[in-house]
Image (spheres, coloured by chain):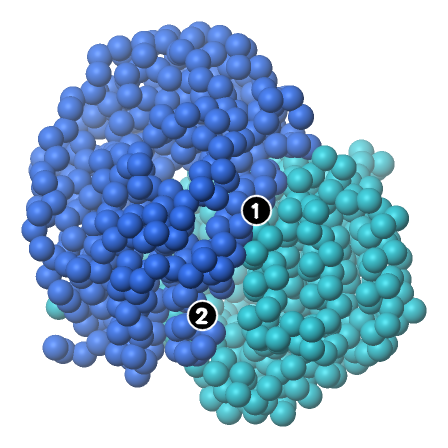
Amino acid sequence: MVGKAVPRPRVHSFQLPNGLRVLLAPLESSPTASVWVWYRVGSKNEHPGITGASHWVEHMLFEGSPRYPKGAIDLAVLRVGGELNAFTDTDFTAYFTTVPREHLAVPLDIESDRMTRALITDPEVERERTVIHSEREGAENWPEFRVEEEAYSLAFRVHPYRWEVLGRRVDIERLTPRELRAYYGKFYGPRNATLVVAGGFDLRTVAAEVRRKFSRLPASGDDVSVHDVEPPPQGERRAELRGPGTTPYLQVGWRAPALDDPTTPATMILDTVLGGENRLFHAGAAWGRAAEHPSARLYRALIDTGLAVRATSEWRPRVYPDLFSVHVQAARGVTFERLEKAVERVTDQLARSGPTARELDDARVRIERGAAMAYEGASRTGFRLGYFAMLRSAEFEDDLFRRLLRVTRTQVRDRAREMFRPEARVVVRYTPTGGDAGE
Amino acid sequence: MSERNDPLRVEYADGPSGLRVVRQGPPAGSASFSATFLAPAGWAHDPAGAEGTARLSSQLVTSGAGHRNRLELARFLDRAGATLTAHVDPESAEVTLWGPATEWEPLLRVLADAVLRPRFEEADLLRVRRQLLERQMRELTQPASRAEREMMRAIFPTGHPYRETGVGDPRSVRRVRTDRVRRFHSDHFTGPGSVLVFTGPVPTSAVARAARQLFADLPSEAPPLLELPRVSRPAPPEVRVDLPGRAQVEIRLAGTSLARTDPQFAGAYLANEVLGGAAMLSRLFRRVRSTGGLVYHASSQIEAMRWGGYWSAQAGAGPDRWSKVVPMLREEVERISAATIPGRELDVVRESRIGELQLSLESTSDAHELAVEVGYFGLPADHWKTWPARLRALSPREVRTAAEGALDARGSVTVLAGPVGKS
């Protein structure tokens, strides 16, 4: 078992003198090629007053650079049948383009142009302000978003994980184009970037093309480490939200360790046993899957008993200590007190006895199965290589995989015991005001 | 790649009891397979007074089948690295199994169990009923869901299956018992009218042989025929649902459209892509978001099904902006059929959509969706192979003619759901 590795395509990596890390994964038979640029910049690098800046920069990188004026990026990619998008997280931002393989030069040219030279003009920033407002409003229409945002702002008082990636409303109102350009100029550059290319291409040709296009960029990109350390919680923190809707929601969260903590594999198994998901090694879609897991502990304790219509756990390994959460959507007429007691019974049980041997074996088998099919297609390969590079490295995936398969029941129990302490808990209740089914 | 393994070309075969079998070769480098059983078991077939039966039935087929109860089935699938999912729409129910290609035979057996021997246990019915009741409430109170619901009710007349969303109401759902679910299932999961679509590295002959063996118990009686009311009622011009406290208004403009097998479909498809289907290239995105800066999402779609279809243009806008967005959507919908699309604009969108076909061959599940479409609508085996040529043969004039029929703004409805205030 010690020698096991995730079956993945052969990856050729190198670093340019300006700091850009490059991962190339040729997939001989792939009809497509996928280009991903990952920046180690995310909402963790913001501060009050400019929250949401990383996400805003993500939007602006589609709005023009010297060789690609406004609209030209979309046109260049879409006209050849490609697709493109981007997403921002707490720890990183990723831009991706997948094209028919013969058009690989298009995204490489775009990414080299906008890595350090995006225009970010005043009128475009102002126009985008309402677009971003609109994106946030759309999210606010969902009670789950409000609950999650509140849970993080309760759990963190010092660390930048305390604000949502979309940014605070007040900051979206006030952030200036000058501040946005300064933020981009400070952090976005080869030193903070990893370029991943996966798909049907000739290795030597593409390696040469990458060197030609990206080597001339300046070695920019300031240190993105975060030095704020969240002190340990000294007691339970609670919030009660009220808002439109008819369904009560409950989120219970506990502080969880950072990715490089030795207990990370045990925490991941705990997540699988509680909620049924394993977000990094699973069969199916690229990032998590919205399936039901009847064998998961929360499912049996809350859904089978009629207390809830949805119940799951969520933990994604992040660079800094984060939150391990349980999300519950209550069934009609069930009180928060009953829900909280039911969640507590489940977590207490795991802290007392850990998972059963069968639960642990099931979790291991699923991880192995998931890993076996994790790299299907160019886009997914590009995503996965870049994601692990952002967390640490492609080798880190193998290391984590091997450690996951070695986790014991006792380690999971100890992790549950350490984490599920009432004094380290945040609880957010969402009470629907109801009676507003519209007129 | 041999013609037989080209995922853009499927092969048809006969299964037992009138079941049609469609086999598609796998995308290059794929290690997985997908199999979907499509049955004429959509909510159009819900018994009167027991609306919600089709949704409950489709949810339950994945909750235990054959000799495995719900927990045993879930555990078996998890350990195999496979997923079993169900989906239902007005016309049909589909049950899909995805898993490692090396395990296709035992997993196809699980799919056959779900189709032929679902357990329909009382405890599972109670659980999915609770979830459906919750969904009913969400449909009424969540702006996007509410806008969709009101849109369908505005454009299709009472009694039309597309008018409903299949969730029923609290009374009808509580009326559904296990015996009713069993009856519904056995009446509609039959050979005639059903299709088994398989994508994976297995020859057609082997898939057909397995289908004949595993689905041999399928009833051979055709499901009851449905009589559809004619869509002749003019839609009301505006439906406004005030949902105070929400942050954003969901906007829909919609009208009836054509069926998937209509000869005008290709032209209508291209017209819709220019209007709002082709993401950042589309007119709606460019005008309302890129230039106007008014919304985050703005798009359009044509849902072309077996018995007919509908088109819709949609956006979400804040309480201070929605009134500016609505006329923009309307103008763009009107313009798509009132004026011929300039050749250059049409060419860019057309080539974009043709090129995108290659991206659908990245994974088994993506490619499988293409085969499901072919199988469900009974399209020619080389439908996707010839699709680019058919799109390229369309003139701007032909696209406009198709748009006139399929994206007709006259008689369309505008739906607003969110903080719109009292009218």
User: Which amino acid, mark 1?
Assistant: Gly
- Per the rendering, the mark at residue B355 is 1
Between residue A76 and residue A320, name the one nearer to us. A76
Name the chain letter of the residue that bears numbered label 1: B
Picture coordinates of residue B285, whole percent (x, y): 43, 67
Is residue A96 visible in the rendered image? The answer is: yes
Question: Which chain can be seen in cyan?
Answer: A
Left or right of A224? Residue A131 is left
- Quadrant position of residue B336: bottom left
Left or right relative to B285: residue B327: left
> Is there CB contact under 8 Å for labels 2 and 1?
no
Q: In the rendered image, which residue does mark 2 sit on?
A: B286
**Taking B278 as reference, is A258 left or right?**
right
Q: Amino acid at mark 2?
A: Arg
Disc 2 and disc 1 on one polypeptide chain:
yes
Chain bearing mark 2: B
Calculate the distance from the C-alpha at mark 2 to the C-alpha at mark 1: 21 Å
- Of A402 and A335, the residue lying toward us: A402
Q: Residue at x 30, y 48 (%)?
A: B402
x, y percent for residue A255 = 60, 66
- Provide residue A35's location: percent of width, then percent of height: 70, 56
Does A387 sit above or below residue B267?
below
> What secondary structure is found at the residue carrying circle 1?
helix
Near-viewer residue (B168 or A187) = A187
Q: Colour of chain B?
A: blue
Tell me which label, 2 or 1, sits earlier in the chain. 2
